[in-house]
């Protein structure tokens, strides 16, 4: 029962606003911390429903030994939603078990009242921003086409329209062509389209890195996904490559590596070799991996942009303590190390660095430091021009956080609650020759502006004048 008292103590402190959930959990003995954290977070997730059940069953009124709501919450959580109360048959456990039938009955009534077909649908994030994020579904083009998917969705009664307007509305995304947005209430986890690998459940912002990296669909292509698990981005890269060439998907953690392999198999990724290694331990001159021309880096980060996690609920985000700052700085140092290592690969031409963080420390600051490194200077790495990294996306990097404010336009940000996605950050480093070649072929180049529209064509003399200035306009 001591384990439950530990969880109750954490919940009491959180109710009293005595710190963030991370800070309070840090005070729990390390041997119990993981288990306590899991119970606290899961209890918070179902707190509203559990409270309703406890009140309806009159548990606190009838059982004086259960002397606090938080104690009732954690015990009823495990009784109804876990494997039962994990404690000896003491008086407190028996007090709850006496009401087992009533508690189960009230729980079923809540499910019926809310129209929930599964317990998971009763979970609450307590984050209003999550309600503004559609359910995104990426069509896995290794299995079928976007046209076939569109026809299937329509046959199931879905109608094209604003995905937040009504449950049967869906919409094809304007930035990621093989991505569809559905109402947040729509569930696909038990759907045959999902279980067969035809669709991937992936947030829109999480689709940006592979889309921006844009590896070639050629048999001689060599691509690296440096931190692959659970595999959404790797499967997206595979689809873009049309299952051609070779994609090395690295994951150092053995359990996550197992998840990665299952995901890749389900997604029909035939050109992917999963590698149970730390990317940082791989030599850039390795004859096998050193041929990579495209590398995707989505390293460990604070996860501060993810709004549907529970561990943000009671954080005082506006008041970052010294512990949080230290953690962010350690993450940023690791992230920079990953970029520098990727830049050392002799054949690499394009490197995407992304995070699901909203902190400039992990985003703009890491990028601006990377541009000053020996690897960036000797390798002629620059930020790709805006034209080459989701030019139609409205939210760019923070100008004041970059040494050269113009570089912020080469960065992509997603703001949770405002952009219909989770919080995200994406950047693209390219070798200077590649950047120049790409830039020379875009409408940003004055030499090419005639392709944009007649108004930009101008008389021959105007064209010659712009031609003279074009060199100074390059990055």
Image (cartoon, rainbow, N blue to C red):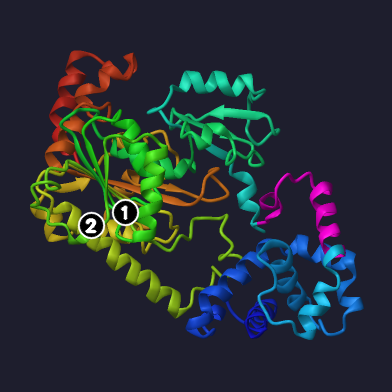
Q: Are dots 1 and 2 in contact, CB under 8 Å? A: yes
Residue located 55% across and 78% down the image: 25
Decide which of 443, 255 is in the foreground and name it.
Answer: 255
Magenta region includes residue 107: yes
Determine if residue 398 is in view. Answer: no
Determine if residue 168 is in view. Answer: yes
Q: In this view, does 256 lie above or below 318?
A: above
Q: Which of marks 1 and 2 is nearer the N terminus?
A: 1
Residue located 22% across and 41% down the image: 223
Decide which of 470, 122 is in the foreground and name it.
Answer: 122
- Crowding at dot 1, Cα within 10 Å, few <14 / some 14-19 / many 20+, comes out as many
| Residue 258 picture location, percent across and down | 37, 53
Magenta region includes residue 290: no
Quadrant where the image shows the C terminus: top left
The numbered disc on residue 227 is 1
Give the extent of the magenta segment.
Answer: 102-124
| 239 sits left or right of 337 in the view | right
Residue located 85% across and 53% down the image: 109
What distance separates the C-alpha of mark 1 from that of mark 2? 7 Å
Q: Mark 2 points at which residue?
A: 279
| Residue 400 picture location, percent across and down | 36, 57
Quadrant where the image shows the N terminus: bottom right
Decide which of 218, 192 is in the foreground and name it.
Answer: 192
Decide which of 287, 259 is in the foreground and name it.
Answer: 259
Q: What element carries label 2?
A: helix
Residue located 91% across and 77% down the image: 61
The answer to which quarter of the image holds residue 93 is bottom right
């Amino acid at each position: 029962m001591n384990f439950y008292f530990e969880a109750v103590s954490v919940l009491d402190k959180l109710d009293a606003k005595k710190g963030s959930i991370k800070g309070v959990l840090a005070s729990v003995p390390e041997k119990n911390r993981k288990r306590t954290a899991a119970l606290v977070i899961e209890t918070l997730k179902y707190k509203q429903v559990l409270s309703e059940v406890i009140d309806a069953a009159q548990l606190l009124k009838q059982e004086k030994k259960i002397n606090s709501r938080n104690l009732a919450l954690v015990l009823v959580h495990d009784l109804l939603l876990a494997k039962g109360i994990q404690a000896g048959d003491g008086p407190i456990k028996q007090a709850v078990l006496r009401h087992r039938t009533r508690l189960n009955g009230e729980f079923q009534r809540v499910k019926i009242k809310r129209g929930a077909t599964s317990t998971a649908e009763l979970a609450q994030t307590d984050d209003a921003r999550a309600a503004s994020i559609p359910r995104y579904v990426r069509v896995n083009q290794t299995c079928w086409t976007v046209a076939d998917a569109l026809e299937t969705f329509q046959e199931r009664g879905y109608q094209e329209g604003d995905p937040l307007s009504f449950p049967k509305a869906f919409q094809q995304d304007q930035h990621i062509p093989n991505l569809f947005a559905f109402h947040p209430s729509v569930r696909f986890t038990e759907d045959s389209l999902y279980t067969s690998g035809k669709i991937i459940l992936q947030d829109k912002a999480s689709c940006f890195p592979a889309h921006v990296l844009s590896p070639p669909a050629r048999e001689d292509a060599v691509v690296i996904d440096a931190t692959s698990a659970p595999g959404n981005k790797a499967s997206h890269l595979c689809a873009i490559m049309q299952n051609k060439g070779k994609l090395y998907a690295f994951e150092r953690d053995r359990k996550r590596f197992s998840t990665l392999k299952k995901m890749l198999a389900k997604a029909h990724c035939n050109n992917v070799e999963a590698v149970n290694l730390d990317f940082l331990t791989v030599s850039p001159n390795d004859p096998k991996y050193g041929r990579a021309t495209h590398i995707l880096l989505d390293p460990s980060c604070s996860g501060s942009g993810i709004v549907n996690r529970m561990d943000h609920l009671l954080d005082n985000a506006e008041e970052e303590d010294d512990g949080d700052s230290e953690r962010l700085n350690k993450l940023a140092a690791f992230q920079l190390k990953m970029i520098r290592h990727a830049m050392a690969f002799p054949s690499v031409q394009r490197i995407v660095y992304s995070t699901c963080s909203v902190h400039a420390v992990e985003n703009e600051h890491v990028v601006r430091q990377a541009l000053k490194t020996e690897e960036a200077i000797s390798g002629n790495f620059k930020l790709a021009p805006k034209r080459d990294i989701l030019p139609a996306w409205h939210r760019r990097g923070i100008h004041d956080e970059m040494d050269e404010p113009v570089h912020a336009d080469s960065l992509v940000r997603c703001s949770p609650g405002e952009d219909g996605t989770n919080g995200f950050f994406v950047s693209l480093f390219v070798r200077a020759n590649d950047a120049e070649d790409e830039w020379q072929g875009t409408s940003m180049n004055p030499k090419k502006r005639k392709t944009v529209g007649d108004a930009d064509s101008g008389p021959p003399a105007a064209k010659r004048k712009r031609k003279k200035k074009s060199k100074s306009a390059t990055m």
